[in-house]
Amino acid sequence: MFIAYVIAAIVFLFQSGIHAATSKSPTPMQALSMLMEGNRHFVTGEMKHISYISEAKNRLLENQTPFAVIVGCSDSRVPPEVIFDRGLGELFIVRVAGNVLGPIELDSINFAIKHLDVPLVMVLGHQNCGAVDASLKGKENVPEFLDAIYPLIEEALKNCVTIGPNALANAISCNVKKGVDILKNSSELAPLIEQKKVKIVGGYFEFDTGKVNLISD
């Protein structure tokens, strides 16, 4: 066990050295490539970050250098560091039920982009999202504890095809697209997107395959 931790620490230090050399100003597309390559590791079982214990104790983590923001759902089955096989300090994560975007989430994203120079934001939905499913069934079926979240998802579903066998999957994708649209039209982020300093993308995580699929606008 001790040897495994030592090996994990060495691997992390090596990867961190590479990241430190290249992550000061990764392009948005480089960041997206890094993110999707990590998901490929997860899908194929070739994960590199096997010990968060050694990473958490590493002095390099006193300063964070994330290369991507993940706006994800609070669902306990969708841990971004794991499904993207990234180390501690590499992802700036904003999680809320239904991966919705309100003022608090937007402030968190702006902090990451403007203070930490993060070039990529992914709004990540997932298969069988309970918050979207509840909203899809109508306000009368939404639990009281989703009162603040429901209106945000309802707005995303206004122009969405929510009938048929793929209704829930369509609704989840529409909810992701709404989040992407909010960010792209943000007065804070729009200039940075226009200058190609920041990229906003949507993703859909499949439980059965472990794969994250990009969602087109």
Image: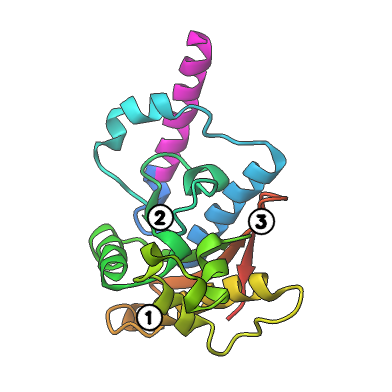
Estimate the x, y position of residue 50 in percent, counting from the top left.
Answer: 53, 29
Q: Is residue 216 above or below residue 121?
A: below
Mark 1 vs mark 3, foreground winner is 3
Magenta range is 1-19
Q: 10 Å neighbourhood of mark 1: few (<14), some, or many (≥20)?
A: few
Amino acid type indicated by mark 3: Glu
Q: Secondary structure at mark 3?
A: loop
Q: Earlier in the sequence, mark 1 or mark 3?
A: 1
Residue at point 44% right, 54% down? 74
Q: Secondary structure at mark 2?
A: loop
- Residue that label 2 marks: 67
Estimate the x, y position of residue 8 in percent, counting from the top left.
Answer: 49, 23
State yes or no: discs 2 and 1 in contact (Cβ < 8 Å). no
Q: CA distance from mark 1 to mark 3?
A: 32 Å
- Residue that label 1 marks: 195
Amino acid type indicated by mark 1: Gln
Q: 10 Å neighbourhood of mark 3: few (<14), some, or many (≥20)?
A: some
Depth order, front residue of 83/146: 146
- Residue that label 3 marks: 206
State yes or no: discs 1 and 3 in contact (Cβ < 8 Å). no
Left or right position of 90 against 169: left
